[in-house]
Image (cartoon, rainbow, N blue to C red):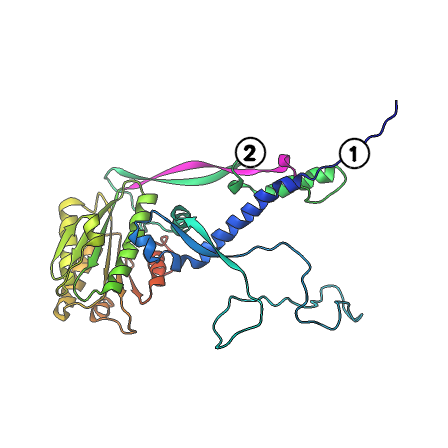
Amino acid sequence: MSGDFILNREDWSLHRKGHIDQARHQEKVRESIRKNLPSIISEEALILNDGQKTVKVPIRSLEEYRIRYDFNKQKHIGQGDGDSKVGDVLGRELQPTPGKGQGGAGNEPGVDYFEAEVDIDEIETILFSDLCLPNMEQKAAPELETESYRFTDIRKKGLQSNIDRKRTLIEAYKRNAMRGNPGFFPVLPDDLRFKTWEIHHERHANAVVLAMMDTSGSMGNFEKYIARTFFFWMTRFLRTKYHAVQIVFIAHHTEAKEVTEEEFFTKGESGGTRCSSAYQLANDIIDQRYPPQDYNIYAFHFSDGDNLSTDNEPCVRLVSDLLNKTNQFGYGEIVRSHFSSTLMNAFRKIQNEKFSTVTIRDKTEVYSALKTFFRETGESK
């Protein structure tokens, strides 16, 4: 019995085009976050809304390969002169860059950018990935447990965001080669491979962080905003990565006092500045509640450095006392000029590996302050 038959081969790769484009888009978003991280984390809207929102980041548009009109109107269409050999570079495409003001109207094409909304959790994942409490030691107090994710296996099913592209292409190549058509495409659903993870628990000795902020009259809106921005991300980092870390909030002008977290981030003060009052209170709190043999202790202080000149020497002495009790002490100075304060100059006398300082003149430098104070042990400053 004879009959007419129609053989049809469906290109299953077309069914995955949406997933492929989505994965490319997500990778572009992550790449843009990494490039713009110093600006993103200093966005005022994020700080004032307690982080419960999304943020927009600029993403360069994606284009498929296509034949494009030659705007330079070259005389020829691309043929060689006969003298070329394998490996010669015939020409490079000039990449247009985002427009910057040049004092007049331009006539060159630009690059298409659009804004993608990104949840703050995505930002935190990238920001916190290489931050940690440095110089952790085993202590006698109850242990602090941290949680991390480790990719340990490859499976045929999983989330599209966890697709293992290399393994997927290898599987596609092997299958196509077995059929006499070696190549990476088409990629069929059975070729897909996904990374899977397991939750890894690590136990560390307990930790406490003392956050000290200058709230005196010399701290203007910019200075207070920078200090609160740093402590905002520090608090989120600690509570995201360390489940049982304790944070003590200290605000000071000429006098220091322990305050609630809400007061620390919202309350304004005035008056003069005596930074030694904060250091003395930090020493007292440690002596009364957090013995160094039981806790990993960290202290961070932000100020504009406009300290009472006669108070600088007591500050150096009290910070030296704190360094004997803490795993790390970080001092951040917020100034708009190119000159250091007398307090910063006094701190240069301190020669201790556990003591770090940063100077912030622009809001994008908050990111570098986080990287400096929460770097892995042994990393260069």
Q: Main secondary structure of the magenta part?
A: strand
Task: Quickly name the residue at label 2.
Answer: 157
**Looking at the image, which is closer to me, 50 or 85?**
50
Is 192 in the magenta? yes
Q: Position of residue 211 (x, y in %)?
A: 23, 53
Q: Residue furthest top?
A: 1
Q: Amino acid at mark 1?
A: Leu
Q: Quadrant of the C terminus?
A: bottom left
Left of 43 or right of it: where is 310? left
**Disc 1 secondary structure class:** loop
Q: Residues within 10 Å of mark 1 (few under 14, many from 20)?
A: few
Vertical arrangement, residue 114 with respect to residue 19, above or below: below
Q: Residue 13 occupies which quadrant of the picture?
A: top right
**Could you tell whether 319 is left or right of 375 in the image?**
left
Extreme residue in the front direction: 105
Residue 25, compared with residue 363, is above or below; it is above
Horizontal relation, residue 213 to residue 310: left or right: right
Read off the residue under disc 1.
7
In the image, what residue occupies the spot 37% across and 51% down?
A: 131
| Crowdedness near tag 2: few (<14), some (14–19) or many (≥20) residues, C-alpha within 10 Å | some
Disc nearest the viewer among 1 and 2: 1
Q: Amino acid at mark 2?
A: Lys
Residue shown at 68% from the left, 44% from the top:
184
- How far from the left and from the top, in percent, is residue 43? 35, 57
Q: Position of residue 186 (x, y in %)?
A: 68, 42
**Can the viewer see residue 222?**
yes
User: Looking at the picture, how far across and down is residue 46, in whole percent?
Assistant: 33, 53
Q: 237 or 105: which is nearer to us?
A: 105
Residue 110 vs residue 245, the one in the foreground: 110
**What segment carries the magenta color?**
188-205
